[in-house]
Image (cartoon, grey):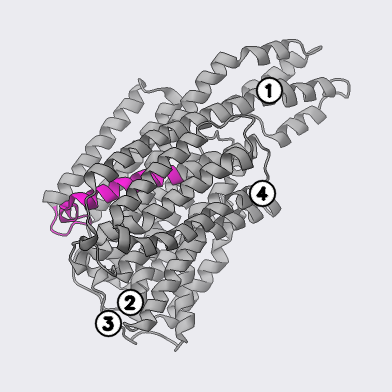
Amino acid sequence: MTQTVAAAPERGHRGARRHAHPALVLLLIAGAQLMVVLDGTIVNIALPSMGAYFDKDQTSMTWALNAYTLAFGGLLLLGGRSGDIFGRRRMFIVGLSLFTSGSFLAGISTTFPEMLVGRVIQGIGGAIAAPTALSLIANEFEEGPERTRAFAVYAAVSGAGAALGLLLGGILTNYFSWRWVLFVNVPIGLLLIAGAFLYLHQTERLRGRIDFIGGLISVAGMVALVYGFIHAANDGWSNGETVGVLVVAGMLLVGFVLFEAYGTAHPIMPMRIFESRSRGGAYLVMLVAGAAMFGMFYFITFFVQGVRDYSALKTGFAFLPIALTIGVTSQIVAKLLPRTGPKPLISVGTVLLTGSLLWLSRVSTASQYADTLLPGMIVLAVAMGCLFVPLTTVAVSKIENTDAGLASALLNVGQQVGGAIGLSVLATVFATSARNFAADHLGGVQAALGRLPGNLPQLVGAKVQAAGSNGIQKADIDKFVNGLPAGQRPAAHDFFYGPYAQLSHQIQAHASGQAFLTGAIFGIVGIVVALVVINVKKSDVPSEPPLEAVAA
């Protein structure tokens, strides 16, 4: 998404190998967007199963999300620019091919690094496919009602994709395996690639250069920052590697800003976009919103499956009210916006976001879905609905039409990058809190272990020690207990499903609460930004923002 994306060339009929009904063309474009959006939530539900397979703790599993979101968010602007220069249909097919290949590689992976490589390839493909899909609408549909309807379908698919991903992730993980949340993209991707090759038209290739150096510097800086936080979670803040990586991350990110400002004639993130104080504030609020959204999905997924013993399918249905609430709230807010202006709605959204995270920070082993989790989730969903449309409006207010697509695309970048970096910070807090809580409350489990008969203290102790911070999955506990002599099974069963399970649940609840509390601190920053930095009046808001910007 760059200046050239907003100024798309008129529709042409060159290059389509077969004539297609406009509905089929829209199906191809919307289908690609649905596949990319689905991936933002479908993997969440499968994370506990993936962690059990790869023998990774909850903190390490953040990489399964961040590998994708960092590549996707970090390269999104570069992907949009590549479509302008090399042709949108061509790059649309390239993006779909990479996304499909990455899904397959991640699905067949047998080691954690192999899976992460597949997720990175997915993210790169998504960063190319998503912006080119949006700009292809301008190429394939004539300006007017036809294009308006196409953008409406595109936006609806983007909103519904999150809900569908939650349900599909639960179904596939529950009835098949975690691998199918990745494999499901393969047949869909192949069909879309074939359809794009046959039915989409060539687009005009614009002159210009791609800021590869800036893109690489920004992604390297964000990866280093996330790695530093995760490393701190495992090895502490005073560890030499942690400090060194964080210093390098800071240098890279500062270098990226300087390079974009002074080092290139074709920046992917031109500094003029940030000349508006309000627009910069909108991006900061979106960073906070991304961190809150990613954190909520992540920690509640592990909590309900680990403490409340939810299946993957039940977890997917548990999240469904969030997507529905965001959709309904966004429609209401869109109607209120012309009367209130964006600032009151953004302020309310940040207050609700902070309040929901404070509410969720009360989570305990006794917390139920209906009395604790659902109210917090609903309030957070209302907050997101209050934020998305007004933030987009602020991003495109008082800006040249040629920059509208870039300005709104940066909101998407902010959501993805904020989610990745925010989740790494919250995961670091979670891991540190879990480690400290376990050290303070281990006495009861050790005493119960010592009271086991015969050689069970040695056998069970070795099993617990081998699991470490990963904990032991229910299936592994049952397998271990059933492998013991019949006379020892009752005592081992009572230990694992008594003192051991109780401490594990307490650790999960306490550490999740601390992570949500940290998220609330981010929310307070969002409140300050909304009240002090954002200052867009009703008269400054475009009566009808560019559809390309809204859909982005």
Badge 4 marks a residue whose secondary structure is helix
Q: Are marks 1 and 4 in contact (CB under 8 Å)?
A: no
| Label disc, if present, on residue 138 of the rendered structure | 2
Determine the CA span between mark 4 and mark 3.
47 Å
In the rendered structure, which amino acid carries the disc numbered 1?
Tyr
Identify whether 377 is placed above or below 84. Answer: above
Task: Quickly name the residue at label 3.
Answer: 10
| Label disc, if present, on residue 314 of the rendered structure | 4
Point out the frontmost of discs 4 and 3. Answer: 4
Indicate the quadrant containing the C terminus: top left, top right, bottom left or bottom right.
Answer: bottom left
Badge 3 marks a residue whose secondary structure is loop
Lower position in the chain sequence, tag 3 or tag 2: 3
Secondary structure, magenta segment, majority class: helix
Q: Are marks 2 and 4 in contact (CB under 8 Å)?
A: no
Q: Are marks 4 and 3 in contact (CB under 8 Å)?
A: no
Q: Quadrant of residue 520?
A: top left
Judging depth in this view, the residue of 404 and 486 nearest the camera is 404
| Label disc, if present, on residue 364 of the rendered structure | none
Task: Quickly name the residue at label 1.
Answer: 500
Indicate the quadrant containing the N terminus: top left, top right, bottom left or bottom right.
Answer: bottom left
Region of the chain picked out in magenta, as a range: 264-293
In the rendered structure, which amino acid carries the disc numbered 2?
Ala
Disc 3 crowd, CA 10 A, few/some/many (<14, 14-19, 20+):
few
In the rendered structure, which amino acid carries the disc numbered 4?
Lys
Disc 4 crowd, CA 10 A, few/some/many (<14, 14-19, 20+):
some
Outermost residue to the front:
339
Outermost residue to the right:
487
Q: Is residue 544 left or right of residue 445?
A: left
